[in-house]
Amino acid sequence: MAHSDRLEKSLPMILFGILVWFCLLSCIWCNELTVLNLHGMQATQVSTYSHLGVNLSADLAIDNDLRTHVGGFSCAHTMHDPHLWWKVDIVAKHCLGRITLVNRGDCCSERLSGAIVRAGTESDILNNAACGLPVTTDQASIPGAHLQFVCDPPVVARYVSVDDADHSNGPKDDVLTLCEVIIEECPIEDCVQMTTATTMDKALPVAGILSTLLFEGKCIVDPRLLSVLYMNSPMQCFLSCKMNGCWSFDYVMTSGQCRLFDVKAGDLKADDLPGCLVYAVVRG
């Protein structure tokens, strides 16, 4: 009976611990989200397809029209191209927390598979970090789906884009159709706080373990690779490193690739790779 009482008393703390751990892995680091008004913003895309004499231009993805049939002339649609992209310039810098893509609903929804959402301050979209992971085949199989991508942590950005940059199996000659792009921002102080915690301090603290940023624009070169994962942020990569007992890791901002290594700081070697961050773990 005493054991049962102790368990009952400790249950709230156990549940609280689970909730905190879950939020570290998946919650938006944001106090509140507000939908940005994209009316009048400049949207561009790699090319423009014409349907029944009407250009399905990039701005149709920010026209507040949620219809998902191309015949309704409310979806942005490119021509066939091996390097697909769409981009909107939101003029000023905002602290972005979540981006939603509305997929085509009348046919061909699977074409969105592999698409990457990015947000950042660079006009060259490939220099900006990915928000969330690429669209999966299962996600793309649902016609008219609203696909959400969390920027975790929130990111300061002027440009939001969608591209299909994975050409590991060769360029894809396909099209990109976006029926709507919805962008939600956090209070700018959330980005300031996150910058202070993860960039200016150059360390990510969890339970007495620190992960110190050693290199920016480089990736680790070493055969002692423990695992390769895909995460939404360096913090999530660090948490995986902590759980797996690794001594260092690198994180590619543009793809979310997280590699864990059994290599201590003094033995680390790194080669140049834009958008890659190298961290060394210090266990207290």
Image (cartoon, helix red, strand yellow):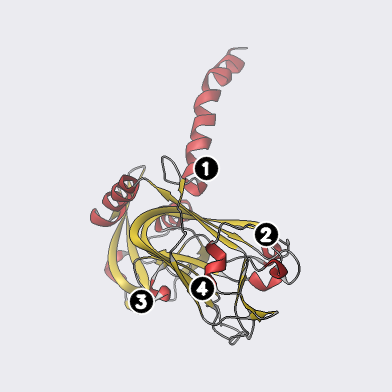
Task: Give the x, y percent position of residue 127.
Answer: 38, 73
Q: Earlier in the sequence, mark 4 or mark 2?
A: 2
Which of the numbered marks, if any, corresponds to residue 274? 3
* Residue that badge 4 annotates: 86
Q: For numbered disc 4, what is the local secondary structure?
A: strand
- Inspect the image, locate mark 1, and give the three-letter code of the amino acid beneath it: Phe
Which of the numbered marks, if any, corresponds to residue 22? 1
- Inspect the image, locate mark 2, and give the three-letter code of the amino acid beneath it: Arg
Residue shown at 57% from the left, 21% from the top: 7
Residue 18 visible in the displayed image: yes
Residue shown at 53% from the left, 62% from the top: 62
Front residue (pair 102, 168):
102
| Mark toward the viewer: 1 or 3 | 3
Alpha carbon distance from label 4 to label 3:
21 Å
Within 10 Å of disc 2 (Cα), the crowding (few <14, some 14-19, many 20+) is some
Q: Residue furthest front?
A: 53
Q: For numbered disc 3, what is the local secondary structure?
A: strand
| Mark toward the viewer: 1 or 4 | 4
Within 10 Å of disc 1 (Cα), the crowding (few <14, some 14-19, many 20+) is few
* Residue that badge 2 annotates: 67
Task: Give the x, y percent position of residue 11.
Answer: 55, 24
